[in-house]
Amino acid sequence: MIFDVHSHTWQYPDHFTDQFQEQARHARGGKELDLTVHYEEYRSTAPEDTRTVVFGGKARLSGLWVDDQFVADYVQQHPDTLVGFLSLDPTQPGWEEELRQGHQELGLKGIKLMPMYAGFRPDGQDLDPMWQYAQDNDLPVLLHTGTTFVAQAPLECTLPRHLDPVATRFPGVKIILAHLSHPYENECVVVIRKHPNVYADISAIHYRPFQLYHSLMLVQEYGVWNKLLFGTDYPFTNIEASIEGLFGLNKMLEGTALPRLDEEQIHKVIYRDTASILGL
Ligand SMILES: [Zn+2]
C-alpha cells in the first residue's frame, strides 16, 4: 500500500491572489501553472489501495487561503482514501478557534503549517499552545520547509533547524518536514536524525534529480532512510512521476563510479506504513 502524506485540495485560481499566480508563473519560466485539483486525475496514477493526506493551505502573506470546511467537504466525498489535515496561519486572528473547530467539529486529523509563506517562526513561544494541543490530541504536524518562488516569504522562517527546539519541547508530536527542506537538506537530515519524533517527506523534489540524488546520499550516509515518508505534493506532481523520479536517480550514474542509492531503501520509503507511524 502507498500512503501519500502530502497533497492539496483547493479551487484554482479562486483560493489564490493574482499576485500569487503571477509569481507562480515566474517560477516555471513564464509557463502558466495549472494547479487545478481533480480527484480522478490524481487517482489515475495511484494504485487502488493508495491512501492520501490532503490539506489546503493558509498563508495570508503569500495570498493563499483555503478554508478547512472546503477540505473537510472534499474528504467527505472520498472518505475511504483521503485523510484531511487542517491548516493554520498563526499571524492571523482566530487561529486558535480554527484549530479546535477543524479538529473537533470537522474531524480533521492533523495540522499543516506554511511558516515561510505566512511569515512566522514555528519555534516562537506564542505557538506553544498549538504544539501542546497537537501533543494532547495526537495530531501530526506537517510543515512546509524549504524554499519557494514567493518573493515576500521570508527564508528565515523556513529553516529546518527551527524544529529542533520544538521537537525537544514536544517529543510527543509527530513532526514532518516537507520536501526534505530543499535546498536545506543537510539541516533537515540532522534534525530528523536527532529526534525520534521528526520525519521528512520527499514530495515534489524529483524534478531536480541531481539535487535529489545528493540529498538522498546524505540520508544514506547519515543512516536516516527510516525517517523518510513518501509524498507527492499533488497537483504539482503525481504518484507515478514521483516513483519514476526516485528510481531514475541511479540511472544518471551509469558509466561512473559514483556511489549508488540503496534501491531497497527507496522501495521501503514508497511503501512505508506512514498511517501507523502517524497514528492515522
Ligand atoms: Zn505542498
Image (cartoon, rainbow, N blue to C red):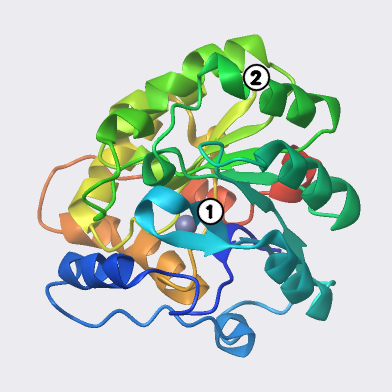
x, y (%) of residue 189? 40, 27
* Residue in the image at 10% along x and 50% along y: 256
Q: Amino acid at mark 2?
A: Asp
Earlier-in-chain disc, 1 versus 2: 1
Mark 2 residue element: helix
The residue at label 1 has a CB less than 8 Å from ligand 1: no
Picture quarter containing residue 184? top left
Q: Is residue 249 above or below residue 111?
A: below
**Number of numbered discs:** 2
Instruction: Estimate the x, y position of residue 30 in percent, counting from the top left.
Output: 13, 77
Q: Quadrant of residue 260?
A: top left
Q: Which residue is mark 2?
A: 128
Q: Which residue is mark 1?
A: 58
| Left or right, 98 with reference to 23 | right
Please state the horizontal and vertical placement of residue 40, each as a whole percent of the image.
62, 89
Q: Is residue 214 left or right of residue 270?
A: left
On-image quarter of the N terminus? bottom right
**141 left or right of 199 in image:** right
Q: Is residue 43 left or right of residue 15?
A: right
Asked if residue 35 can be seen in this view, the reply is yes
- Where residue 131 sits, quadrant-wise, is top right
Q: Check the image and report above or below for 32 versus 139.
A: below
- Nearer to me, 90 or 134: 90
Give the residue drawn at x 81%, y 42%: 100
- Closest to the observer, 168 or 158: 158
Looking at the picture, how far across and down is residue 81, in whole percent? 77, 71
- As drawn, the residue found furthest toward the right would be 105
Q: Nearer the viewer, residue 145 or 205?
A: 145
Q: As shown in the figure, which amino acid type bears the numbered disc 1?
A: Lys
Helix, strand or loop at mark 1: strand
- Would residue 190 be visible to someone looking at this image? no
Residue drawn at (49%, 70%), measured in percent from left and top? 234
